[in-house]
Amino acid sequence: MGAQWKAKHKMDAANAKGRIFTKLAKEIAVAARNGADPDMNAKLRSAIEAAKKASMPKDTLERAIKKGAGLLDGPANYETVVYEGFAPHQVPVIVECLTDNKNRSAMSIRQLFRKGQLATSGAVSWDFKHLGQIEAEPETADADMELAAIEAGAQDFEQGDENEVVFLTEATDLDAVAKALPEFGYKVLSAKLVYRANNPVTLDDAQRAEVEAFLDAIDADDDVQNVYVGLAG
């Protein structure tokens, strides 16, 4: 799902959790620009669900909502910037940054891509699908994922790593499908736009380890929000 390359055993657990909270807090703050009430703001509701799933402390979550809504320290001035390029062995990569300083982000990304190749806009994204991805879990034993996908308007679905189901949608249908799924017995855990590679690259173990180290370094940058990679398996 864009982060399947992560070698979690290499990370220090505390640092990893802190990094996740930082990224989730940014998403919450940006979503809260359109209103601090999750009942009236689907994007905020989804971001809050993701934060709860990651066990974010309540005070951290509430502070992020207030910051985004302009109720604390002024409004959150985050902008989304997308970079495209190649990891070692010509593996395509799309990096989404959420930053309050585009110059700082650009400098960091240039440094991080020294072992790969930073490309121009469109050089990589043409070979990715930009689509909606909804993670949901069945609320009843008889919930039918295929029926739910058809009736809610999803394009495809697949079983997740645990009990959850991943529903894939057209980018423009993301909100509508997310709103419809509860009618068919599914609780939405997250709903977001993602990139999926059309032609993922297959590597041997040594090459894969090199690419994973490259991607881990990018993901560790504070301004980087999401990393999508065309890597098979």
Image (cartoon, rainbow, N blue to C red):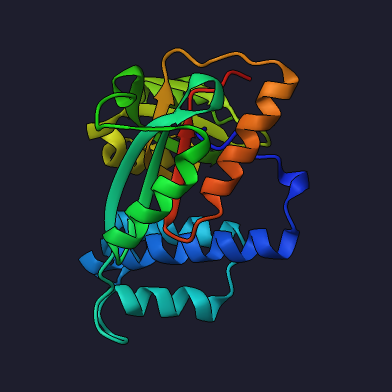
* 137, above or below 150, in the image: below
Q: Residue at x 48, y 61 (%)?
A: 222
Residue 88 x %, y %: 55, 27
Nearer to the camera, 128 or 30: 128
Nearer to the camera, 99 or 61: 99
> Along the horizontal axis of the image, is 77 left or right of 208?
left
Nearer to the camera, 194 or 120: 120
Residue 94 x %, y %: 39, 35
> Along the horizontal axis of the image, is 84 left or right of 113?
left
Residue 160 x %, y %: 61, 31
Q: Residue at x 52, y 81 (%)?
A: 59
Look at the image and tell me whether residue 218 can be seen.
Answer: yes
Look at the image and tell me whether residue 144 can be seen.
Answer: no
Nearer to the camera, 24 or 177: 24
* 59, above or below 135, in the image: below
Quadrant where the C terminus is found in the figure: top right
* Image quadrant in which you'd find residue 28: bottom left
> Along the horizontal axis of the image, is 65 left or right of 74?
right
* 46, above or below 68, in the image: above
Q: Residue at x 33, y 35 (%)?
A: 177
Q: Residue at x 48, y 73 (%)?
A: 61
* Image quadrant in which you'd find residue 161: top right
Residue 76 x %, y %: 28, 73
